[in-house]
Amino acid sequence: MHRVLLLHMSARTRSPCFRLALNSGSIFARERVEFPSPAEVGQKLRVNWRVAETYEKRGRHYQRIAIAIDAEDGTPIIRREVHDTFFFSEGSDPA
Amino acid sequence: MNNGTEGSAIRLETPAAGDLFEGPVRRLTLARMLAFSGGSFDSPRWPQANLHTDAGKAREFGLASIIASGTQSEGILLGLMVSLFGRDWHRKGVLDAKMTSSVYVNDTIQAKARLESRDVKPEGEHFVLEVWCENGHGEKIIVGQAEATLDLSN
């Protein structure tokens, strides 16, 4: 399976817990991703998202999110550390 | 190591530090962006309205027009890695990538990689590459580093 499909399906926006503040958006800034095992078509996978860190850099808010994709038997398929930044439309409150 | 892609500049059988590998030039059409970021095709709300699919959403946040998902551009870079390393990329590939610029509808993207080092280790032949994607103006939209280990027992 092409790895970008797995990256796409494990984006932070896919987490059922993901919510953005009103009038805000987020941008994928950088990541480190490891591919320890292949995934096959038809295989069931589990994704876990964890906000590992929040920080500010040059006046912008960032989150570092640790993302793990595992097969049902626990085989690691993908390990990601994704950094996202946030932006806000006019009149919104980033605090 | 495979022979790269149709865009590769050189043979990769005996790569040396400094060698440049190039993927094919891809055009990120609106259709491709909707297919990638519009959600499930069978959804009655397809395409989902977001920064990558809807001009109004993009304008809400001060963007002149929709921009491609960074992951979509990253996928083009991953395609070059798969072309170079085959299944070994799926087993031992590592990518560290930073998005440096936005990609707009009908921009072209080409993935490139320059070999920094190759070493034989107990687990196989280990490669480190500087990697990036360029748009049609030669601007880098992704920069980073990739590592892969070829299993020499195959």
Image (cartoon, rainbow, N blue to C red):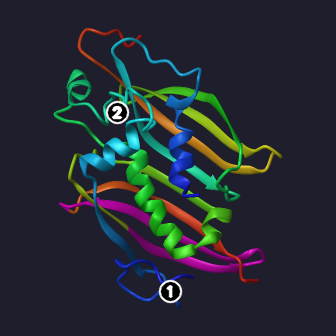
Residue B68 is left or right of residue A85, and the answer is left
Residue that numbered label 1 is attached to: B15
In the image: residue B35, left or right of residue B63 = right
Which of the 4 image quadrants contains residue A45?
top right
Q: Quadrant of the C terminus of chain A?
A: top left
Give coordinates of residue A21: x percent, y percent.
Answer: 42, 13
Label 2 and label 1: CA atoms lie apart by 43 Å
> In the image, what residue occupies the spot 79% across and 43% down?
A72
Task: Inspect the magenta stretch and tell me whether residue A68 lies in it.
Answer: no
Mark 1 belongs to chain: B
Left or right: residue A60 compared with residue A83: left
Q: Is residue B131 located in the magenta-colored stretch of the structure?
A: yes
- Whole-percent x and y of residue A32? 55, 49
Amino acid beneath label 2: Pro
Is B10 located above or below residue A32 in the figure?
below
Which of the 4 image quadrants contains residue B95? bottom right
Where does the magenta region start and end? B112-137
Q: From the image, tell me which residue sits under label 2.
A: B47
Q: How crowded is mark 1: few (under 14 residues within 10 Å), some or many (20 or more)?
A: some
Same subunit: marks 2 and 1 = yes
Q: Can residue B103 be seen in this view?
A: no
Quadrant location, the N terminus of chain A: bottom right
